[in-house]
Image (spheres, grey):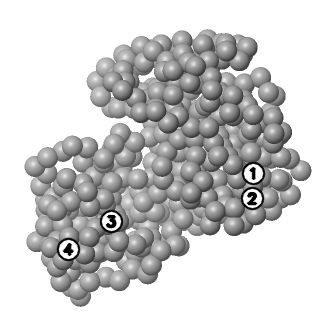
Amino acid sequence: MSRILMAWEMGANMGHIDRLLLTARALRSRGHEVSFVLRDLSRAHARIAAEGFAIGQAPVWLPKLANPPPLSNYTTVLAAAGWLDAPGLAGLISGWRRWYEVLQPDVLICDHAPTALLASRGLGMSVWTIGTSFEVPPRGAHFPPMAHWEPCSGSRSATDDATLLPAANQALALHGLAPLARLTDLFDGCHQAIASLPELAHYDGYGPDMPFCGPTYVGDSGIEPVWPGSVGPKVFAYLNPAHTEFARLMQALRELGVRALVHAKGLSPAGAQRLGGPQLRFETQPVRLDPALAEADLVVSHGGLGTATAALLAGKPQLAVATHMEQLMTGRRLATQGLGLAVPPGATATDWRHLIGQLLSDTRIAAAARAVADRHRGETATGTAEKLADLIEAGR
């Protein structure tokens, strides 16, 4: 039996907790002792503590960056984690190393937890980074650009890495630890696995030894889907009603005459009445994805990986309306493989009727989406967790 610590530091969605919990269940069933140190304990009781796992608060960076330097690769994530402030970063390292001293883990699993990874240097435990490909960028001399499709995008990578390296090394020096020769050395000596589908890789450039273990989204929770109307193709949408184009998008759905089921968390009753229609139904509570997507002809979302994965496994075309870079990277991956269309953050004057109509009528996109679903038929989040547990036990 091993003592295993699961660490979550960055990000705000429930995908991190779900992914770690699935893997923790698999590991505990094999006799390992698993504990959690998490960014957000307010979401942890029903999912983790209620199942008997020990939980603790992760050291996280609280100040907001004022006038941060322009960064274009994984350094954007590190800067948001406090890596521009050497004394502050040293404080976070102290917090993580205290957790390691108290819990004495044999294995550390980092899910979007770069500072936890940095703090583990020199302690001799087996260390893993597990997450989406956005959180596990490909290895190289420098971190690759996020917008890797743009001409000359890679020219800034060395400069971006050099911007953060001195502060990281100063923080390490405050703990008497050896410096990083380059920022990508953060991942030296740790094992890596991507809990996602290869079709949704955010980056290019992974080697054949990088395991893509499969989906980890949980699609069986929420209310049952209820479709409005009786005639027309079905569109399932999962969108933030605060998005600047939300009203225009709803107008397009009404005008197209589709049967639209829209999960819009936080939408007021007055807003639902103003924007809805006989064939447009709003739900403010989460909707069970599996049955909803089984019936949908098209999925419209912001391009979050969980929804994109669920739609891909259901074989449905997608319209990704990104609100930030990570979602845009997912949307562009869908678009370049002929699985859907992507709209970048801040896009205005978008012809939503045209885009939705195109996706509903394009048989090639529909066929490509079905082909991906067939390729991954039978893959489940539980199966992914078992694959991850196999890798962790093997220590690869």
Q: Which mark is residue 103?
A: none
Residue occupying the point 74% across, 38% down:
99
- From the viewer's side, name the closer residue of 92 and 21: 92
* Amino acid type shown at disc 4: Ala
The reply to whether the C-beta atoms of the residues labelled 2 and 4 are less than 8 Å apart is no
Q: Is residue 94 left or right of residue 228?
A: right
Disc 3/disc 2 C-alpha distance (Å):
31 Å
**Residue 388 appears at what percent x and percent y?**
69, 50
Q: Which residue is mark 1?
A: 35
Q: Which residue is mark 4?
A: 270
- From the viewer's side, name the closer residue of 189 and 263: 263
- Vertical position of residue 150 compared to residue 23: above or below: above
Residue occupying the point 47% across, 74% down:
222
Q: Which residue is mark 2?
A: 53
User: Which numbered disc flags the more N-terminal residue, 1 or 3?
Assistant: 1
User: Which numbered disc flags the more N-terminal residue, 3 or 2?
Assistant: 2
Secondary element under disc 4, as helix, strand or loop, is helix
Q: Which residue is mark 3?
A: 266
Disc 1/disc 2 C-alpha distance (Å):
6 Å
**Residue 160 appears at what percent x and percent y?**
42, 18
Disc 3/disc 4 C-alpha distance (Å):
11 Å
The reply to whether the C-beta atoms of the residues labelled 1 and 2 are less than 8 Å apart is yes
Sort mark 3 into few (<14), some (14-19) or many (20+) by Cα contacts within 10 Å.
few
- Vertical position of residue 76 compared to residue 310: above or below: above
Sort mark 2 into few (<14), some (14-19) or many (20+) by Cα contacts within 10 Å.
some
Disc 1/disc 4 C-alpha distance (Å):
44 Å
* Amino acid type shown at disc 3: Gly
